[in-house]
Amino acid sequence: TTGMTLLVSALLSLVLTACQGNGTAGETAAADTSAKPNIILLYADDLGYGDISCNGATKIHTPNIDRLAAEGLRFTNGHAAAATCTPSRYAILTGEYAWRKKGTGILPGDASLIIPLDRATLPSMLKKAGYATAAVGKWHLGLGSQGEPDWNSEIRPGPNETGFDYAFFFPATADRVPTVFIENHKVVALDSADPITVSYKEKVGDEPTAREHPELLKMKYSHGHDGTIVNGIGRIGFMQGGQRARWADEEVEDVFTVKAQEFIEDHRTKPFFLYLAFTDIHVPRMPDTRFKGKSGLGYRGDAILQLDWAVGRIMKTLDQLGLAKNTIVLFTSDNGPVLDDGYQDGAVEMANGHKPAGEMSGGKYSILEGGTRVPFIVRWPAAIKPGVSDALVSQVDLLASFAAFTGQSLNSADAPDSYNVMDALTGKSKQGRSTLVEQGNGLALVEGNWKYIAPHKGPKIAKNVNIALGNDMQPQLYDLKSDLAEKNNQAAAQPDRVKEMAAKLEKIRSD
Ligand code: NG6
Ligand code: CA
């Protein structure tokens, strides 16, 4: 199979690279040529294509992410599967477009698990291939099987049941209750005398809400986020209890980074897969004190610096353990950027000309390119020659790609939308997918230079966040090569192409 061929040629180049002797002593010692490469998926939240300096940002510097790019392959046409978190994460773990399945929109913090347990997932497949697997960070795919999970006892099914041997995470987003960490099936540091109650419908308990007591907030909300106040910040939803278990926002990224480092250290001698889903740069942006005010772009920029620092810590850990050479590090983001996502954190006022989506239009929530075209970097010193790739690749492809790569077979019901693009991911081919369905409010089909956006109702601009959504009742057709900003709709001039692409999208939809 191509997976085997790849593995063999990868191993060959590993031997060659090891022979060049350009690693440190530790590197050479640990570069066991028979070992499967470790896989680390660094998953940023809401980080835009233009938010990192290797993609052209000039108002902010991300030296660690830039180093990953300089030592790896930087993709200019790499995509999240959707323009918001839950559907993107659903797709990256299942290899299925989220729009095929109901209930995969942005989930509340008390939702049930939406990942099917009868199919292969990225971690369960890698587990079969002999990898130790861990999820650290943001989850946001639901927990429990029906109704609200019981936060005070065993919380399952969750990440452990979807293929992760180890999980340290928070349930939804940093702005959603409950604001606690969970390790495997238990809330961390829970005091049984102070049980947790959560509601997304009505206030529970007598703690102040942001709506009733805005004077208690250390960061005001701009829209939404008027529920229970935790750590001086209004949240979505209401919670009571679990005082000792609650996190301080300033420490969250540190905690995740340390947990990830521990997992790497503990598994240094066998192949591992680490899914590290950072909380940055999602709201509420409340970075550690040492990053506050450092970017000049407000807390959003400071959170980018914190994220870059965390990436640097992981790279340093790999260097120190001599694992860097034979570890595939993938860095990407779950959806495009947003400035004001509900808190007055200065992101708009202090943007200073920074373009979080680069030259693209739209951002988070949008069907325009800014919604899903995100940072996408793959580094694997043993086998990938550094460079830049324009291949069309999507996060939905990781499952099929790594399955082929590790020689795992998938059932026909598994990963239906995932293609093996391993040759593109490793730079052996300039060709990625030939078509891609993008998901915003509605759907779009990309094929070569062309992008067709299916007619969709809804506002043209999401007012609260000030993002062009790309909704239109008329079909839209853009030539992304000459018109990346999607300003010049050619649908009227090219009815045949519109018809053809609309039919193709319809076919994929009904497959
Ligand atoms: C929205 C929230 C936003 C963010 C988003 C999810 C409001 C007004 N807005 O509903 O702040 O939490 O959901 O983001 O509540 S995501 O990256 O997880 O998809
Ligand atoms: Ca997100």
Image (tube, rainbow, N blue to C red):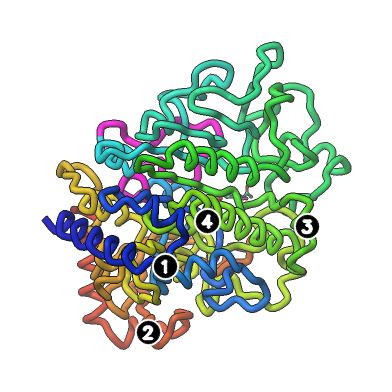
Residue 410: x and y, percent?
18, 44
Chain-order first, disc 2 or disc 3: 3
Residue under label 4:
315
Q: Nearer the viewer, mark 2 or mark 4?
A: 4
Residue 99: x and y, percent?
35, 51
* Secondary element at image label 2: loop
Q: Give the alpha-carbon distance from disc 2 to disc 3, as whole Å.
A: 38 Å
Q: Which quadrant holds the N terminus?
A: bottom left
Using residue 136 as the reference point, say whether residue 422 is left or right of it.
Answer: left
Q: Nearer the viewer, mark 2 or mark 3?
A: 3
Asked if residue 95 is among those painted magenta in the image, a careful observer would answer: yes
- The answer to which of 461 and 100 lies nearer the viewer is 100
* Secondary element at image label 4: helix
Chain-order first, disc 2 or disc 4: 4
- The answer to which of 99 and 128 lies nearer the viewer is 128
Q: Which residues are drawn in magenta?
A: 92-118
* Mark 2 closeness class: few <14, some 14–19, many ≥20 residues within 10 Å: few
Residue 175: quarter of image: top right
Q: Give the alpha-carbon distance from disc 2 to disc 4, as whole Å.
A: 34 Å
Can residue 425 be spotted in the picture?
no
Residue under label 3:
292
Residue under label 1:
22
